Image (cartoon, rainbow, N blue to C red):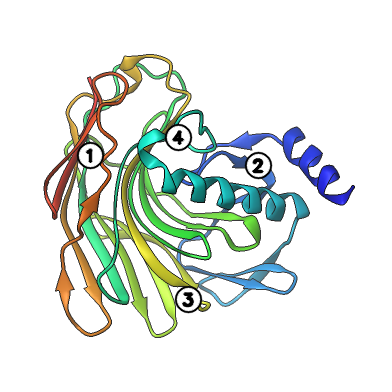
Amino acid sequence: LLVLSLLVITVLCVNIPTPFGLRPQQCVHRVESGSHIEEVLEGVKVTHPNGTFKILPTLPECVEFQKHYEQERKTWRQNQNTRGNYTKDGWLDNTWSGLKGTERSFTGLYRVPNTPASDSGQWLYYFIGTESTPLTILQPVLSYHSGWYIASWNCCPAGQAHESTPLYGFGPGSSLTAQILSSGDSWTVNSIFGSRNTALTVPNAGRSWNVLDTTLETYSVTQCGNFPTGAAIFSELEVGYTDGSRGSPSWYDQSGATECNGRLTVYNPNYITIQHN
């Protein structure tokens, strides 16, 4: 009865876009850049750069949503070439890589594509990311929603997703720096434009990091004009390992042709483009 009640609550929730699927609105939080995110007994503790903190309480519907999402995503990952009716997220163009050792960093540059000719309230998320077991993800995300911005994301302690304060003020052709870095027992996600950075830090918390992603995720796209023309470019992609070595990802299972002449192209392990129209 409890499980049924939680499922009913989840169905009745308003789901909103994130770069890791549509999620119940009350499970998605924007936090100050530089905040430290840590799961605690009561929920998630957000420690701000000035040392003050708040607790985002555990909500049963967020935990239940994440449990089902994790199981369905595991099934999709095992059958990625036959995505079928899987609609829990909008990962349209994607390629992924395993890791050859214990990850210390994953970094790259983003080149912003042209602004879409038509704005219908669509959401476009371009990112590199690092996934773990149990299922969580760290992402520096270039986003388009009535304009371009970049933010750092962390998902999913207590079923919650956290977005750092976004950076605005750039456009087509701009170069952005994306960094996922470990230091001691913590990870930092940096999303950088020029001299400005918006960041989150999270504890490792015993997680095993095992998958790298390069992705375009979309929501509310209703016409080809909602996509940019020209390519979004991911360059200088590099993985660092705890033994001090550095290397290139080994990309697998590219998503192939997608809507509006979409294609993800791996020119070499360090250079990927995603283009539509």
Name the foreground residue: 71 vs 192.
Answer: 71
Where's residue 118, x and y in %? 35, 16
- Closer to the chain start, of discs 4 and 1, is 4
Is 89 displayed left or right of 63 in the figure?
left
- Closer to the chain start, of discs 4 and 2, is 2
- Closer to the chain start, of discs 1 and 3, is 1
Query: Disc 4 marks which residue?
Result: 90
Is 145 displayed left or right of 104 in the figure?
right
Could you tell me the amino acid type at mark 2?
Gln
Where's residue 75, x and y in %? 50, 46
Query: Disc 1 marks which residue?
Result: 112
Contact flag, marks 4 and 3 (Cβ < 8 Å) = no
Query: Disc 2 marks which residue?
Result: 25
Could you tell me the amino acid type at mark 1?
Val
Q: Is residue 50 above or below residue 192?
A: below
- Closer to the chain start, of discs 2 and 3, is 2
Quadrant of the rendered image containing residue 276: top left
- Closer to the chain start, of discs 4 and 3, is 4
Q: Secondary structure at mark 3?
A: loop
How many angstroms separate mark 4 from mark 1 (CA)? 20 Å
Quadrant of the rendered image containing residue 104: bottom left
- Closer to the chain start, of discs 2 and 1, is 2
The quadrant of the image that shows the C terminus is top left
Q: Residue at x 47, y 53 (%)?
A: 165
Residue occupying the far left of the picture = 267
Tell me, for residue 204, which label it has, or none: 3
How many angstroms separate mark 1 from mark 3 (CA)? 30 Å
